[in-house]
Image (cartoon, coloured by chain):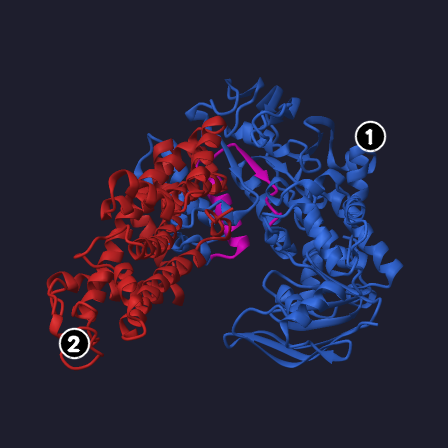
Amino acid sequence: MSTVMLDKFGLSIGGEPVLSEISFLLNQGQRLGVVGRTGAGKSILARAIVGLLPHGATTTGSLRFDDEPLPDDGAALAKLRGKRIGLLLQEAAEAMDPLATAGAHIAEALTAAGETADLEAKTGQWLADVGLDRSIAGRYPQDLTAGERSRVMLAAALCGKPDLLIADEPLAHLDVLAQRQVIGLIERLCEARQMSLLLIAHDLKLVALLCTRVIVLEAGRVVEAGDKAEVFGRPKHAHTRLLMTAGRHRARTLMRTPIGAVLLEVRDVKRVYKRRDLPVFSPRSPVVALDGVSLSIRQGESMALIGPSGSGKTTLARIIAGLEHATLGELEIDHAVYHGTDLPRIQRREISLVFPDPTQSFNPALTVGESIAEPLQLESQRLMDELSERMVEAVTGVGLTTDVLGWRPDAFSLPELQRLAIARALITRPRLIILDEPLSALDVVGRGELLVMLNRLRADFGLTFLVISQDLAMVQVVADRVLVMDKGKIVESGTPAMLFDSPQHELTRQLAAAALPEVGIVPVF
Amino acid sequence: MTDTLALLRTGRFGPSRFRIGAIATLVLLLVGFVSIVWTPYPVTSLDVGSVLQAPGGAHWLGTDQLGRDVLSLIMKGILTSFVVSAVAVFIGAVIGVPLGWMAKIWPGIPDRAIGALGEALLTFPPLLLAVILAAVAGPGVLNIMLAIGLSVAPAFLRTTRDGLVAIERLDYVAAARLAGTGRVETVRRHVLPNLSPLLLAQIFAQLATGVMAEAALGFVGLGVQPPASSLGLLLRDAQSYASVAPVPLLLGGLALIAIVLALTAAALGLRDGLPGYLRRVGDEP
């Protein structure tokens, strides 16, 4: 038996209210989803339930686990977390111990839950359950991808057979195929063990798939709560409706630039890496990231590149943008042939790249204005007046005002920062913009808004897009043509509708099947 | 440098720990500097008539077994601690930072070789290095500076190398390359301003290590030689007379603790302000 009961629970940190008047009851075997935008207080709620609060936090109301308040004593609380509650925090993947192998993390959780026999076999089984190779057990966190780390931590959270799993954005960093696997695993365990689930997500589709009840948080308050069918079927509060409509990308515009001649050609590009992370004397088989990729993008076109993690999408983007070098093959833009880093300076301003994580794409020591102006040094013959005009054009183009240019990156929210990253990409008036997972760091509402903006920019500036994405809903909205990549090769191409309605390649079929279903009643336009 | 100052002003480096540590360090440093021009009594003046006096009267903190004024000794000792440690950390940084930089720009065998050299140095505690140097060149302040310098160099090596690796992996460095920024300019504009708070934190942390090492070496008689004074020497003398006059031992120890705590607080405060991907850089493996 385990129940979580919150009654008029409130939390403030340093006098600032973060959560207020939160009440809900989660009985054994029930599955509750908490949805809301970034900063709504979802993650802090998860931490509060397990007693992991920052210094200076004060609570009001009551929070009871199994009809008892949380123990004050740290050891008892840790025992509760180890045995009864499985916890997967959002930053869990970053909080791994760098000195312990992936297997050791799971073995530790198993031991804490009192399972000491056959640790190795059980660890291997858990890794397989979350869709990882058993050999990962012997590897250290820094040698794993973010997606692998988060799945190791999910295994560690689940292996103690907890009565309650609290999962905060469990699908972050996972590609669509892995997402499906994790959803399936959580669902199976909930059914088999009568495990309760408290799922925190900004994506309503995920909550709709896994949970039976939903609460919607806005700025630390519950604005709507109830049965899934009730909340998503007949949303009463405006915020719920906002989250729902934002999740349904309908940003396609009728404004289009005509598609012109070929802008960029990629001819049989290969990229082979030497591995440097192995011990000195071990044999080094090279890693093939790109295995003969050819494609051409026409002026004004929007092309999407999809595929699982590690399929070579980002490597291709970095070669096109001139950050990495092709081992074999060549590229051509504007009759200039190049191989990656030798992209001529004159052509550099024709291509821009927008990175996935906006927090890492701005130097914290510079103002955003200085960062945005940096690419202007590629325009050597321009007059100062024109350059400042460009700044205004780029910043207003992404819907911000120029007075923010003197601020530093930490003054902005994630969506604003991603807009500024796009402003930097626009500043040289490029013809091709490569967008590498541009929505991955944003919540549903931020995603919807950015998509509308991208389509508008494309029409206004006559841009050509190469979009790298896992988000098939997004691809359907922004792309004219889609390329599917797997293991460094392009395995299928076509219009989004063609690919998703009648996929030919096995991977395309899996990707199309893995997309999460829409939420609620889809209105007919 | 101006970019670094701007970064320090963002407020991320504002909070308590760094400020408390930095202010305490400045106060102690001031006490040390005052001792250059003024101490209540000259530390070289022996007064056989008034040995092992209790605090109060003419000598505020009493006298030691040779009749020297304890307050003056502590003031001079604080200065010695800071000077020896600062020179040693400077030596360590001058050795470690360029080596770390080289390890970063020459990946593969040179990187591994430099890393192995650093680890080999780490296996020698400063005490052992100082004993070896003292055996070769005799005890003395220059030798312990060199010994402590060598023993803190690996920390600078690792911080520089790992910090550079962590920073150069970030997208803003890639963005600078896309923007046509040259290599040198990228380092000046993007890498150094973000590396320097990390190095500054390491400097404070290693200053604390240096102060401890200096006191330990002085205590065993390998460091500063009398008639010069250091906290280590003071403690060594005082512990022989601890049963008769416990005050010098207590106060000397407290002064040492104060310096180490102040420097450590400043180092940790600086580290708190670092972004997550740099916070654990340079930690002992």
Q: Is residue A427 shown in magenta? A: yes
**x and y percent of residue A487 in the render?**
70, 29
Colour assignment, chain B: red
**x and y percent of residue B69 in the render?**
17, 70
Which region is colored magenta?
A: A412-441
In the picture, measured across the screen, residue B37 lies left or right of residue A42, that is left
Quarter of the figure with residue A86: bottom right
Nearest the eye: A124 or A325: A124
**x and y percent of residue A110 in the render?**
75, 56
* Residue under the point 39% across and 44% down: B156
Instruction: State which chain disc 2 sits on.
Output: B
**x and y percent of residue A77 in the render?**
67, 70
Q: Amino acid at mark 1?
A: Gln
In the picture, measured across the screen, residue A144 lies left or right of residue B5, that is right
Quarter of the figure with residue A74: bottom right
The residue at the far right in this view is A192
Q: Which residue is mark 2?
A: B59
Nearest the eye: B253 or A450: B253
Q: Residues within 10 Å of mark 2 (few under 14, many from 20)?
A: some
* Cβ atoms under marks 2 and 1 closer than 8 Å: no
Q: Quick check: A458 above or below A105?
A: above
Checking the image for residue B144, the label placed there is none
Q: Which residue is mark 1?
A: A504
Q: Is residue A497 visible?
A: yes
Colour blue belongs to chain: A
Instruction: State which chain disc 1 sits on.
Output: A
In the picture, measured across the screen, residue A61 lies left or right of residue A29, that is left
